[in-house]
Image (cartoon, rainbow, N blue to C red):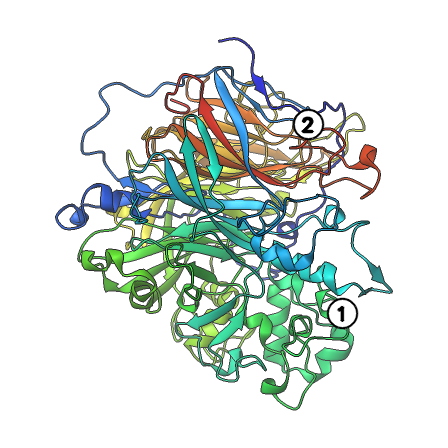
Amino acid sequence: MNGPTTMTTRSTTAVTAHTIDPDDIGHNTTDSPSFDALIAARLSRRNLFRLGVGSAASAMMLSACGGGSDGDPVVDPTPTPTPLAFNFNAVAKSLADAVVVPAGYTASVLYRLGDPITNDVPAYKNDGTDAAATYDRRAGDHHDGMTFFGASSADKWDAAATARGLLVMNHEAITPLYLHPTGQTAVGGVRTVAEEVLREFYLHGVSVIDVKKSGTTWALDKASKFNRRVHTLTPMTITGPAAFSEFMVTKYSPNGNATRGTVNNCANGTTPWGTYLACEENWAGYFRRVTATDNAKRSAKELASFSRYGVAGTGRELWATVTPDTEDNFYGRWNTEVLGASAVADYRNVSNTYGWVVEIDPFTPNSTPRKRTALGRFGHEGACLGPVTVGKPLVWYMGDDAQNEYLYKFVSTKNWDAADATGGLAAGDKYMDDGKLYVAQFKADGTGVWMELKLGLNNITPSYAKYAFANQADVLINARHAADAAGATKMDRPEWTAVNPKNGDVYLTLTNNSARALDTTDAANPRYYNDPKGAAKTAQRGNPNGHVVRFADDNRDPTATTFKWDVYLFGSRSTMAKDINVSGLTADNDFSSPDGLWFSQAASGLVWLQTDDGKITDVTNCMMLAGLPGQVGDGAKRTITNISADGATTKTQDTIVGAAPTSSTLRRFLVGPVACEITGIAESGDGKAIFVNIQHPGEEGTSATDPTKFGSHWPDGGTARPRSATIVITKDDGGRIGA
């Protein structure tokens, strides 16, 4: 092959450091052991139907979680006769304002911020003047986790479909600078243009779009009845143990069983009955709660809850400051302060209605999404479905994406009945509203334990010193406190997870942790180091480059309460010392800040790894790599020597490291434009098209009106404002992607 293929946009020679993500801010002040590894797996419905719901549904299946869709059996019924091998040459690191893919591949823009999803909405002007009322029928911002649901000509779900499907994706957040004529309008900390805020309401949430292939080109069908936006104003039903509790009562829902909207949806999940799970991550920062005036009106328990989740301040986008408010409190419901005589008179409890897994039925456009409280409330990165076996419980694995947080799993009370495979949201009521919630603890010997979060167990009692739990609804709403009480292991930002369909191993990306200290390393979080950035050699200490942990539940049973683990990969520059570049990465596969993670279903055993990086962006933009991993236990014990910031103190840390990658088992496939995050991945039924999201290009721009200060002009080029977008990647010879 010749050189790489580059999507056209301008080049750039310098980038500045990424802004701080809300994920980077931790709210865990407990002294629980540090916890870095955990799990997550989701069976995508696809293979349940591919094998046949009736007889084959009894086979154990796992999804390739973490960004995509559809799952495969734990062990392939017909093993591939020859080992997988990459069908591309490694792409070099790049600072170009472009998407770079290998020679022989083409990346095309499919769905951009502001693109209409119906025929009655005009084309996006991309200058901030488009009418706010049209944004409920436009693409949102910050495209993130997504799933491809193959669709038949009869408008039914068809996992094997190769030329049509419902592409469902999250819109995590916004880059306000590029959304309005001159950026956000605020005077004295008050948003004064209601239309701007309404536009931002719609730009969060979820897109459901019908995409079709014609010849070699994929496009959105704007006439489809399935096209839909779910956003911050969409009515939601609250279900499970926390529904109807006193903690959920608001002016909008005096009964405590409803709320409006979803926000900061990051990674995703699926169910074996054909629905999509949107997960609420950094929701806490959107709410206004001025502690100087509100604290005196709150109980000690309420203050402890707010502190543990970070509900304080004026609100991330100042949404609550708009006046006058609407009759339905579009703006005021973002104020979670005590303002009325009781909870039914204000929104003092509204933040409790966020932080959940949200179930959406993409094939039923008029259905009301449901927030599943049995799965716990925290900063959900994703919700991955594990093995599905007739007569056995269903299992979802969920990470809490913030520094020093935990990873959880939910096990249904009801055993799986294949007759529910077409049950839609009613099946969700059956399996997702009743079950056990667990949190993980990693041991130094390479084993781990799941601890149940239930009132009366594992120190979760009314007498727990830091939070007096009242009932199981209280435990679930304050799942972080419950996990603290149980003694879960703190970890370096648990993000996306994926399951290797060849052997069932579960992979978890641990993006980074600037709060990791020399004296707080442990086996699963073994590194403390400095990665100097740029010509100024700016210090970046802790675990700035992150790592990937994998584990296997004992007996390959995801309902087990024990597991074994090791570290698959350590992020690092290739030039770093061996105790930092533990995986021996080279110029063709070095990376930092792993985030998105997903196994191909068409090429069983091929993993895609995506980055959300601000640590090595002095040498490359964010990227996507392809890997062919082995299995848990294929490496050995390793001792790492960490050095203090002043160089005066060393500490050795034992860990368990998987087999080192080679150029044949890990290589760079894609590099994105300036200041973007590569995230979200899904695949057509034949693996000949993959869908990838390019999030917030140019987010470090400094002007809404001066094109020279936009930071990026991708994907439209010229002097255009940058836009988050979904791309579709195909192989020029029509073959399968990657391997």
Residue at far left of view = 55
Q: How far is mark 1 from mark 2, CA to CA? A: 36 Å
Picture coordinates of residue 629, whole percent (x, y):
38, 28
Query: Which amino acid, mark 1?
Result: Thr
Q: Nearer the viewer, residue 252 or 434?
A: 252
Residue at image position (75%, 27%) is 534
Position of 406 relative to 251 (above/below)? above
Few, some or many C-alpha atoms within 10 Å of disc 2 (few <14, some 14-19, many ≥20)? many
Residue at image position (57%, 54%) is 137
Picture coordinates of residue 17, whole percent (x, y):
74, 37
For the C terminus, the quadrant is top left
Position of 120 relative to 600 (above/below)? below
Picture coordinates of residue 684, whole percent (x, y):
38, 35
Task: Please report whichever mark, 1 or 2, sits nearer to the chain's N-terminal start.
Answer: 2
Tag 1–tag 2 contact (CB < 8 Å): no
Position of 665 relative to 452 (above/below)? above
Provide the secondary structure element on which disc 2 rests.
Answer: loop
Q: Which mark is residue 556?
A: none
Residue 418 appears in which quarter of the rendering? bottom left
Q: Nearer the viewer, residue 543 or 419?
A: 419
Residue labelled with disc 1: 321
Position of 410 relative to 640 (above/below)? below
